[in-house]
């Protein structure tokens, strides 16, 4: 069975031992915590996580790699390997009755589905305590941005978690080297969303509408997203106490909450 990297799966093996150790340390795995490793590949990070975790669940979509990992960790009582697409596996089944225990998500996420994987865990009924994941650096920057450089992804992520970009990883740390930079993000999941709204889904719909044309002024972008006239969008923003001539990227989560409730109050 071949364990060579497959480009169509976005496989780039992290091989730099110092970086691998920094990632494992950043997860701050505590006593009794389960770790879900997404995309273990050939297992370079898996070994470090297995030393720290009371229980490690390695989820690998590549059948050959999953089989190789099973053989490698056959004698490790705290390691189990699950073959499958993490986006298709229900979290409760993945944890296999371990849902009552705290768990941590760690992994080198494929660039093309990294945000989808993060979203899956942040919105699950069985949410992790935190995620420490490698993503494309550009995505990591957008996910952890602050007001002034916000995006819909930043609002969506930070609604559920405190987001920090920990460090960047040079391409030479991978085999084969990717054509883009990578970065490690830590997401400490909140016990409850950062802003109180009556519907998180509806709140995010309004935020997404606000970013419909992110380079335009907020009143125009919101008008496009909500399919209303700019004048009506300006009046809605005035009701929310938000300056209509600024860019959507300037707003905080709390300001989007005010916009959301103004939208709910409209006649």
Image (cartoon, rainbow, N blue to C red):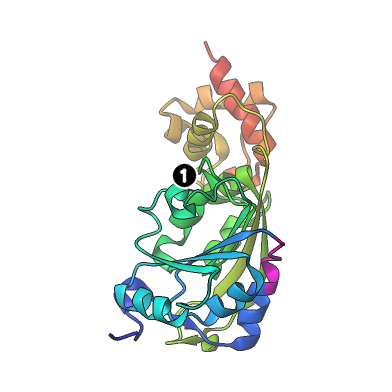
Q: Residue at coordinates 47% horizontally, 31% vertically from top-left?
A: 223
Q: Is 93 placed left or right of 132 in the picture?
A: left
* Residue 26 in view, yes or no: yes
Task: Residue 30: name its quadrant.
Answer: bottom right
State which region is magenta: 25-31
Residue 250 percent location from the top left of the image: 65, 45
Horizontal side of residue 239 vs 36, given as left or right: right
Q: Residue 227's image quarter?
A: top left
Q: Quarter holding the N terminus?
A: bottom left
Residue 243 in the image: state x and y as whole percent.
67, 33
Residue that appears at 57% across and 83% down: 170
- Towards the viewer: 69 or 7: 69
Residue 72: x and y, percent? 45, 82
Residue located beneath label 1 in the image: 213
Task: Kindly identify the residue that appears in the image at 50 percent across and 48 percent down.
Answer: 97
Q: Residue at x 66, y 66 (%)?
A: 27
* Helix, strand or loop for the magenta stretch, by majority: loop
Query: What is the crowding at mark 1: few (fewer than 14 residues within 10 Å), some, or many (at least 20)?
Result: some
The verdict on residue 26 being magenta is yes
Kind of element beneath mark 1: loop
Above/below status of 140 relative to 65:
above
Going by the image, does 249 lie left or right of 117? Answer: right
Residue 96, image x, y percentages: 47, 52
Q: Nearer the viewer, residue 7 or 37?
A: 37
Q: Is residue 191 above or below residue 259?
A: below
């Amino acid at each position: 069975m071949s364990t060579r990297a497959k480009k169509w799966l976005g496989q780039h093996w992290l091989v730099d031992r110092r970086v691998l150790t920094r990632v494992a340390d950043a997860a701050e795995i505590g006593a009794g915590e389960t770790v879900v490793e997404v995309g273990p590949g050939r297992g370079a990070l898996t070994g470090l996580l297995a030393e720290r975790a009371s229980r490690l669940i390695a989820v690998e979509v590549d059948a050959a790699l999953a089989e190789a990992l099973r053989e490698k960790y056959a004698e490790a009582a705290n390691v189990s390997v699950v073959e499958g697409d993490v986006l298709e596996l229900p979290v409760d089944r993945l944890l296999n009755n371990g849902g009552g225990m705290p768990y941590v998500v760690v992994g080198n996420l494929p660039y093309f589905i990294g945000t989808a994987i993060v979203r899956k865990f942040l919105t699950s009924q069985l949410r992790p305590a935190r995620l420490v994941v490698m993503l494309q650096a550009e995505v990591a920057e957008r996910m952890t941005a602050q007001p002034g450089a916000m995006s819909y992804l930043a609002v969506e992520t930070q609604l559920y978690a405190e987001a920090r970009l920990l460090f960047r990883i040079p391409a030479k740390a991978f085999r084969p080297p990717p054509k883009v930079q990578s970065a490690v993000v830590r997401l400490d999941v909140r016990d409850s969303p950062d802003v109180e709204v009556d519907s998180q889904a509806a709140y995010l719909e309004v935020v997404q509408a606000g970013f419909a044309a992110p380079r335009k002024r907020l009143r125009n972008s919101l008008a496009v997203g909500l399919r209303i006239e700019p004048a009506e969008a300006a009046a809605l923003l005035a009701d929310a106490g938000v300056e209509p001539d600024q860019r959507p990227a300037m707003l905080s989560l709390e300001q989007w909450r005010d916009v959301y409730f103004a939208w709910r109050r409209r006649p």
